[in-house]
Image (cartoon, rainbow, N blue to C red):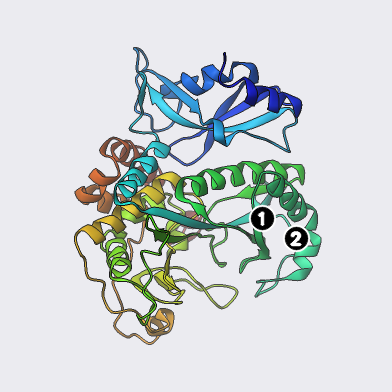
Amino acid sequence: MNPYDATIQRLQAQGIHSILTQFCDLHGAAKGKLVPLANLREWVEVGAGFAGPSIWGTGLGRFGPRSEYYGRVQPESLRPLPFMPGVAHAVCDGYAGGQALDTCSRQLLKHQLRRLVERGWMLWVGIEPEFFLLKQDEQGRWRGADALDVLAKPSYDLKAIARNFGFLDDMRQVLTQLGFQLQQIDHEDACGQYEINYKFDDALAAADRFMLFKLAAHAVAEKHDCVFSCMPKPFANAPGSGLHFHLSLTDAQGRAVFTDRADALQLSASGYSFVAGLLHHADALSALCAPTVNSYKRLAVSHSASGSTWSPVWKAYGDNNRTCLARTVAGRIEWRLPDPSCNVYAALAAALAAGLDGIDGAMTAPPACTHDLYERFAQGLEMPSRLPPDLGQALHALTADETLTRAVGTEFCEQFLAIKGQEWQDYCQQVSAWEFQRYADAF
């Protein structure tokens, strides 16, 4: 008897005939194909096949038994897609030659989580997606999708929410049907920028859920004739988008590992050491958490049209301090470095590896920051050290951090550094409109 017959019958009763087998490439983009539901056993036990070299970052060759990438369906992830009638979505793990693929970012995260299981711990993650709604004009220039969204300080603008309620309510309906427990929808600090928050989950489910969130948002935005954008900093004079990770650990009894109610910041010794590990490896983590050229336009001390910026530029932590790289809140840690262009599996795996290195090495965190770091910077006062200013230096830091690259996964990091190194080189060789304006007739 086929062990998946009951699942097939249940989904067929809902009108499902196909599965969208979805995996994640090195860049964090969803990839996959449609396959028949009736062959579910094959997709679970063998996997849907893909040409390995056609996928960014697999490191697979053009021939031989390890040239084929197999995405093995995780049956517990199957759920109907509201925006694709007759199709169920399924998360896949990467395999090649019958073995788990070391360059699959979901496998990276699962490896780190197994390290926690050995300790009897579980990682819980709340992810905060910020994004822009964009359009291209007739000249091909990108702008905000809402031409009336022009306030100097647009946070929580209800008029913009009313104008864009069609998109936002469609997102609400789709996400609810997909099992998201929504918490809030708001207009963020840049024109055209929104944030949709939903309930935290265990780390792997949280990463899977973010990938599903993006898949849904792209489909809903297209329906409304606009583009859902994870570009960290589309507009130079406006705040950028982050993808903050709220991190907490529990032990086998469900007790909070990071929490000590008697402490001033409500952090335990393990919590402080985890923070210390994040800060110690922050330069290398920048490459994986902020992996594009544009990411470092967000991670900059720059003027914002809204008059404020939350960009986490300095390697510091503090109690409810949004000017720091790590913000502590009631015994949990908000890791503010990632942006929505990251590969969420790799970024989470790297953050966990860094934090565990802090715990295992009993690293000591510096004193907590009790200042507005932007005000201190404006006053010319002594500052904590800063993150790398560009992708090139972040990649150099990741290359130099052998402890982190080994912990995350040498094979994945080699692929990442090669591909992102070429991206940085390509950018450096471009001649921009700014350069023509500045230099064409200057000398």
Q: Amino acid at mark 2?
A: Ala
Q: Visible in this render: residue 246?
A: yes
Instruction: Using the image, determine if residue 427 lies above or below residue 163.
Output: above
Residue 440 at least partly seen: no
Disc 1 element: strand
Q: Residue at x 37, y 18 (%)?
A: 67
Q: Is residue 130 above or below residue 108?
A: below
Q: On screen, 414 above or below 398?
A: above
Q: Position of residue 34 (x, y in %)?
A: 62, 23
Up the image or down, 368 lies above or below 237; here it is below
Q: Along the horizontal axis of the image, is 29 left or right of 412?
A: right
Q: On residue 324, which mark appears?
A: none
Q: Quadrant of residue 266?
A: bottom left
Locate residue 301, reporting x and y percent.
43, 71
Reading the image, the residue beneath label 1 is 143
**Image quadrant for the C terminus?**
bottom left
Judged from this view, the residue extending furthest toward the front is 253
Contact? badges 1 and 2 (CB < 8 Å): yes
- Name the residue carrying label 2: 147
